[in-house]
Structure formats: structure tokens, C-alpha cells
Amino acid sequence: MNKKTLAAGVAAVAITMGIAAVGSMDASAQMGPSWGPKWTKDGKLHLPSNFRRWVFLGSPLTPNGLNDGKAGFPEYHNVYVHPEVFDIYRKTGEWPEGTILLKELQLVREGTYPDGSGDEASGRGFFPGKLNGIDISVKDSKRFKDTNGWGFYNFGHNAPPYPKSAELAPADACASCHMANATNMVFKKFYAPILDAK
């Protein structure tokens, strides 16, 4: 093998390695943080695993029994966020790009009173029943620029098992309400006792 052939071979290997490295960096950049959202090839959001091990932020409830039997959201809204996102928010007061706020719905257990409440050892009240679906919001300022940087996904309003992925919900299904009523797209007042705890 002459010197020219050897040099050409070395250059080809270097170029190939450089392209591979750039490709690897591009793939890494597209993946985002380990706690961020994962997408299917056709742009659907994967349902995160182990979300019940995340930080529990709160559980607002507007039961049918207190809304003439017609509450828009009659379930408990058990809201979770990844521990790393929680730590970032506590330090900065801002939700980082890639934030996932996961809301698992839980039905109110059937009560014995006309308003749907029941008696337990703690007294009369509303108590959680069966799981009934998942909604997710994702912060991505570029992907969701038309809805203030957040996208919303519905994984069914039914008992588990839930679908493994979901399409982006129309803006008028979720985002518009958050845009009109929430603080920076998040109903923070419901989670402030946990988010702001010292």
C-alpha cells in the first residue's frame, strides 16, 4: 500500500467518524433531557412509565354532587411531575423546556348522600374511587408556539390500561382554557402548597 492510498484511507475513516459523531450529537439533541417527553415517529407522545413515583403536586376536585350532576371534570385530578423538573422549578420558579405535567383522573367513590358524599372514619366527605384516564401537558416553546408553549394530550377517560401514545389534542379541548384561566398555562394555585413549601 503506497502512502497516497494509506492517507486516503485514513482521511475516509476520519470523515466517517466525524459524520457519525455529528449524527450522534444530533440524535442526542433531539432526545432532550432523560426526563423529557418521548415521541413516536409520527409525532405522538409516549405515555411515561413509573409516573406514580414522580412528585405528587395535588388533586383538585369538582364533584358532580356539587355541580348539579354536570361537573366538567368530576374526578380527582392527581397531578405528578418528574422529580428533576420539580427541583428545577423550586430553584428557578420556571417550568423548564420538556416539562411534563401528568394528570391521572380518579373517580369519586359512590356515596350515600344526594350530593354524592359518604361517611368514613374521618367524617362525611368525598373519597377517591377507581382510576379513570390520563391527561398530559408538555412544555415545548417551539413545538407548541401557537398555544403559549404548551401542548395537551389525552390518553383516554376510562379505566386502565391506557394507550401507549396519544395525539395532540385540539387547542379548544384544553389549551384554550389554560390560556384564559391559568398562570403561565399552569393552574399553579392548586399546587402552590407543594411547589412553594419551604
Image (cartoon, rainbow, N blue to C red):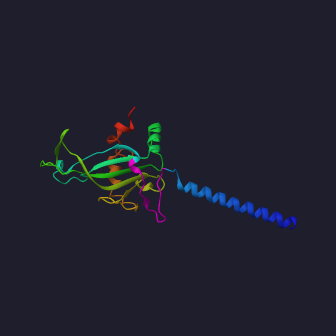
Bounds of the magenta span? 35-52
* Left or right of 148, for residue 4: right
Direction left: furthest residue: 114
- Asked if residue 42 lies in the magenta stretch, the reply is yes
Assess whether residue 142 is covered by the magenta stretch. Answer: no
Quarter location, residue 169 = bottom left
Quarter of the picture containing the C terminus is top left
Question: Closest to the observer: 186 or 64?
Answer: 64
Q: Residue at x 22, y 46 (%)?
A: 127
Relative placement, left or right, of 14 versus 120 is right
Identify the residue at horizontal 34%, vertical 54% (top origin).
176
- Picture quarter with the N terminus: bottom right
Residue 20 rendering spot, x and y as whole percentages:
66, 60
Q: Measuring 47% from the left and 37% from the top, which residue is drawn there?
A: 91
Query: Residue 8's x, y, as percent?
Result: 80, 65
Q: Quadrant of residue 17?
A: bottom right
